[in-house]
Structures are given as C-alpha cells and as structure tokens.
Amino acid sequence: MGGGCSGNHEWSPSSRDQLDHNIEALKTRYPTSRNGWFGRPGDRQYVQVINCEPGTSAAVAERFFRDIGTGATRGDLRGGKGYYYQFDDGSRIQFRPVSSRMDSVVEISIHNKKDYKIHFEEKK
C-alpha cells in the first residue's frame, strides 16, 4: 500500500476505541465480506469493491473516508493525490479521489491487521 506509515507507535486505547467505533457504525451502512472487510472481494487479494449508483462513487468514497477517520489527525498525501487520517496507534486510512483504475479508493491500514483497499465503482 502506498504512503505507508513508519516508526514505532504507542497504542492508544482512546484512538483504537474511536476507530473500532467508526468501523462498527459504518457496518450499518456498507456491506462487508466474510472476513469483515468492507465491500465484496475484488479481482486481487486485499482488494474489495463497493458498487455505487452512477455519478456517486467519488462522493460515497469521500463520505466513507470522513466517517471512518473521525477522531484522527488529517493530512495530505504527497503530490496532491489525496488525503489520510492517522490514528495514535499507527492505523492509517487514505483516500485517493482518482486511483490508477480511474475510480475512487480508500486504503485501510489498521495496526496489527492486514491492509486492504476498497475501490468505489459505479454500477453499470
């Protein structure tokens, strides 16, 4: 995953509790797969897909990003390619409005868990 975090991070119960709360709240609005990741399995390992109504994928992805990042520190990705939220425990959520696949993507990197991406694709 691009733009990863480096260094040692202290585990912060309040930060991790906030992220866990954000995830649980989002599960009421977005589908999850068997492993608990948001979306359905995509065409590659560690890639998920959430289908959106035509013309809404960027807005849906940005709202998802804002909601999952509540309580974290926000910053800009290098090169103006998007934004990230950084939690105190080292967990990081990134949003790129336009990915290499020309859709919006949210990358989820939760401390001590597998990283994955969610592509927000428009229904055909």
Image: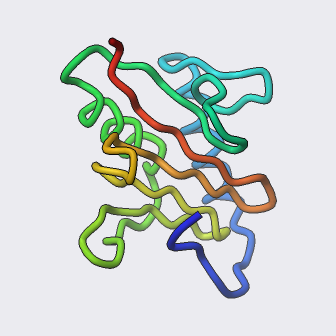
Looking at the rendered image, the quarter that the N terminus falls into is bottom right
Q: Is residue 102 above or below residue 124?
A: below
Q: Is residue 53 above or below residue 74?
A: above
Residue at the bottom extreme?
7
Residue at the left extreme?
55
Displayed quadrant of residue 11: bottom right
**Left or right: 81, with 31 as reference point:** left
Displayed quadrant of residue 35: top right
User: Residue sitting at 31 percent across and 62 percent down?
Assistant: 82
Q: How are the residues colored?
A: rainbow
Looking at the rendered image, the quarter that the C terminus falls into is top left
Q: Nearer the viewer, residue 21 or 68?
A: 68
The mark tally for this picture is 0
Q: Is residue 93 above or below residue 51?
A: below
User: Residue sitting at 24 percent across and 71 percent down?
Assistant: 80
Q: Nearer the viewer, residue 49 or 70?
A: 49
User: Residue sitting at 68 percent across and 54 percent down?
Assistant: 115
Rendering coords of residue 58 (x, y %): 26, 36
Rendering coords of residue 84 (x, y %): 41, 63
User: Residue sitting at 60 percent across and 30 percent down?
Assistant: 38
Displayed quadrant of residue 32: top right
Rendering coords of residue 89 (x, y %): 67, 68
Rendering coords of residue 88 (x, y %): 60, 70
Q: Nearer the viewer, residue 111 or 122?
A: 122
